[in-house]
Image (cartoon, rainbow, N blue to C red):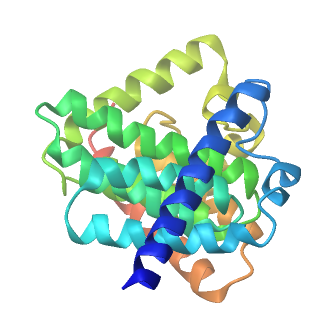
C-alpha cells in the first residue's frame, strides 16, 4: 500500500515538473522559437521517458472517461515531452477536431476547435517533423473528412470559414500564413486540374501531394494516394456546374 502511494506521489510530481518546465521554457524562448529545443528536453535525462509514460497513461484514462478538454491540456504536455513523435500530434489534433468540437454550442465555436487542430499539425507538428508522412496524411485527411464532406453537420460552416481565410490570404499574397508554397500550389493546380485554392479539397490534395514525396512507408503512400483520389472526385463533383 505504501509503495502504491509512493509511486502515485512520484508520478504526480513528475507530471507537475513537466508542466512547470513548459511554462518556464515558454517564458524564456522567443515567440518564434520551436515548442522545445533538444537541449531543454535533455534536461529531463532519464526521467523524460518515465514522465511521458505517466502522461500517456493519464491521457488514456481521461479519454475513457470522456474528459476531452482536460485531455487537450494534457496532450500539450505530451507534445513537449515527445515533439518528434508523430502520434502525439495526431492524437492531440484528433481530440480537438472530433471530440471537443462537437461539444461546442454553436457551429462557429466548433470551427475554432477544428481550425485549432489544423494549426496544431500544420504550424507545430510539421515544423518540427517536416519529413513525417503520417502528419501530412492526418492534415490532408482532416481537410477532406472534416471540411470537405458532410460527416459533421457544421461542415458547410467550416467550408465557408475556410474560404474566407484563404481568400483573405490570397488578397494579401500571404501564403506563408497558411504555410503553403505558391510553387507547389501551382504544381497541384496543373497536375490535378484544381484551380479553386479556397476549396478545402485543394488543401487536402496539397498536403497529401507533399506527404507522398517524403513518404517512406508504403501504407502512408497508399493512404495519401487514396486521399488525393477521393478529394479530386469530391472537388470535381462540387465544381461540375460552376461557371
Q: Quadrant of the C terminus?
A: top left
Name the residue nearer the viewer: 97 or 63.
63
Q: Quadrant of the N terminus?
A: bottom left
x, y percent for residue 119: 52, 40
Identify whether 69 is placed above or below 218. Answer: above
Determine if residue 235 is in view.
no
Which residue does the image show at 61% across and 52% down from the upper left? 18
x, y percent for residue 229: 46, 69
Name the residue nearer the viewer: 29 or 43.
43
Q: How many callouts does the rendering have?
A: 0
Name the residue nearer the viewer: 136 or 221.
136
Which residue does the image show at 33% across and 50% down from the upper left? 70
Determine if residue 127 is in view.
yes
Quadrant of the rendered image containing residue 181: top right
x, y percent for residue 194: 52, 46
Name the residue nearer the viewer: 69 or 57.
57
Which residue does the image show at 73% across and 45% down from the upper left? 184
Q: Is residue 220 left or right of residue 48?
A: left
Identify whether 14 is placed above or below 115. Answer: below
Which residue does the image show at 35% across and 42% down from the upper left? 114
Quadrant of the rendered image containing residue 158: top left
Q: Is residue 55 left or right of residue 134?
A: left
Identify whether 178 is placed above or below 70. Answer: above
Quadrant of the rendered image containing residue 137: bottom right
x, y percent for residue 71: 36, 55
Q: Is residue 42 left or right of residue 143?
A: right
Residue furthest to the top: 172
Residue furthest to the right: 39
Identify whether 212 is placed above or below 108. Answer: below
Amino acid at each position: 500500500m505504501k509503495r502504491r502511494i509512493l509511486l502515485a506521489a512520484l508520478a504526480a510530481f513528475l507530471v507537475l515538473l513537466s508542466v512547470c518546465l513548459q511554462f518556464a521554457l515558454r517564458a524564456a524562448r522567443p515567440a518564434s522559437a520551436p515548442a522545445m529545443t533538444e537541449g531543454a528536453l535533455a534536461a529531463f535525462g532519464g526521467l523524460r521517458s518515465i514522465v511521458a509514460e505517466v502522461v500517456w497513461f493519464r491521457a488514456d484514462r481521461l479519454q475513457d472517461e470522456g474528459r476531452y478538454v482536460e485531455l487537450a491540456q494534457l496532450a500539450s504536455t505530451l507534445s513537449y515531452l515527445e515533439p518528434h513523435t508523430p502520434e502525439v500530434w495526431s492524437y492531440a489534433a484528433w481530440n480537438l477536431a472530433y471530440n471537443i468540437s462537437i461539444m461546442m454550442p454553436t457551429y462557429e465555436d466548433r470551427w475554432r476547435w477544428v481550425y485549432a487542430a489544423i494549426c496544431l499539425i500544420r504550424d507545430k507538428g510539421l515544423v518540427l517533423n517536416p519529413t513525417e508522412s503520417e502528419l501530412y496524411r492526418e492534415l490532408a485527411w482532416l481537410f477532406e473528412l472534416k471540411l470537405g464532406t458532410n460527416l459533421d453537420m457544421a461542415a458547410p460552416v467550416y467550408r465557408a470559414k475556410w474560404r474566407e481565410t484563404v481568400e483573405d490570404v490570397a488578397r494579401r499574397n500571404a501564403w506563408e500564413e497558411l504555410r503553403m508554397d505558391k510553387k507547389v500550389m501551382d504544381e497541384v493546380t496543373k497536375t490535378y486540374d484544381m484551380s479553386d485554392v479556397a476549396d478545402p479539397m485543394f488543401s487536402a490534395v496539397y498536403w497529401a501531394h507533399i506527404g507522398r514525396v517524403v513518404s517512406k512507408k508504403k501504407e502512408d503512400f497508399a493512404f495519401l494516394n487514396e486521399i488525393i483520389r477521393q478529394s479530386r472526385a469530391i472537388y470535381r463533383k462540387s465544381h461540375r456546374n460552376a461557371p
